[in-house]
Image (cartoon, rainbow, N blue to C red):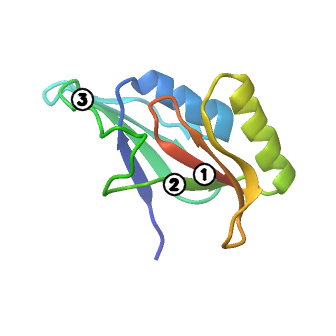
Amino acid sequence: MKIEHIAFWVADLELMKNFYVNYFGGKASKRYHNSAKQFSSYFIVFDEGCRLELMHKPDITDKPDNSKQYIGLTHFSVSVGSKNAVRQLTEQLKTDGYTVKSDPRTTGDGYYESVILDPEGNFVEIAE
């Protein structure tokens, strides 16, 4: 058994697609659009692991304030293969103006990781 994909409602579909393609090496599917439901989406496929589905509808409301914890999906983690790759990607994202919530470090449970916010405030853990 494996997790096949994780889905996000997004406000700016193209911005989010470009973020995951440009920084995490994903490949975007052709944009799907259902005009009757005013629904659009992309699947972002990676070399390994599950896919991301980025979905947009104009009537979806904002998520809770991301400065506080709330029930639901907290974050997802992307393995980049090495401590050096964690440091490099985190620094690149910081340089490009993205929020780094946690600089690279070894956590109490033994993971080497950083945590950043994607363009719409979702927590993304960048792990070794």
Q: Which amino acid, mark 3? A: Lys
The residue lying at 46 percent from left, 77 percent from top is 1
Residue 58 x/y as whole percent? 22, 24
Quarter occupied by residue 9: top left
Q: Is the C terminus in the top left, top right, bottom left or bottom right quadrant?
A: bottom right
Which amino acid type is marked by label 1? Glu
Local secondary structure at mark 2: strand
Residue at the disc numbered 2: 76
Quick one: label 2 or label 3, which is nearer the N terminus? Answer: 3
**What number is the disc on residue 125?**
1
Question: x and y percent of residue 60 in the render?
Answer: 21, 32
Q: Which of the two labelled residues, at mark 3 and mark 1, occupies the earlier sequence position?
A: 3
Local secondary structure at mark 3: loop
Residue situated furthest front in the rendering: 68
Q: Residue at x 73, y 39 (%)?
A: 90
Return the residue at label 3. Answer: 57
Q: Badge 2: how crowded within 10 Å, few (<14), some, or many (20+)?
A: few
Spatial separation of the CA atoms under disc 2 and disc 3? 22 Å
Amino acid type assigned to the residue bearing label 2 in the image: Phe
Query: Residue 92: horizontal and vertical position, in percent?
Result: 76, 31
- Measured as percent of width and height from the top left, residue 32 is found at 34, 32
Determine whether, in the image, residue 9 is placed left or right of residue 103.
Answer: left
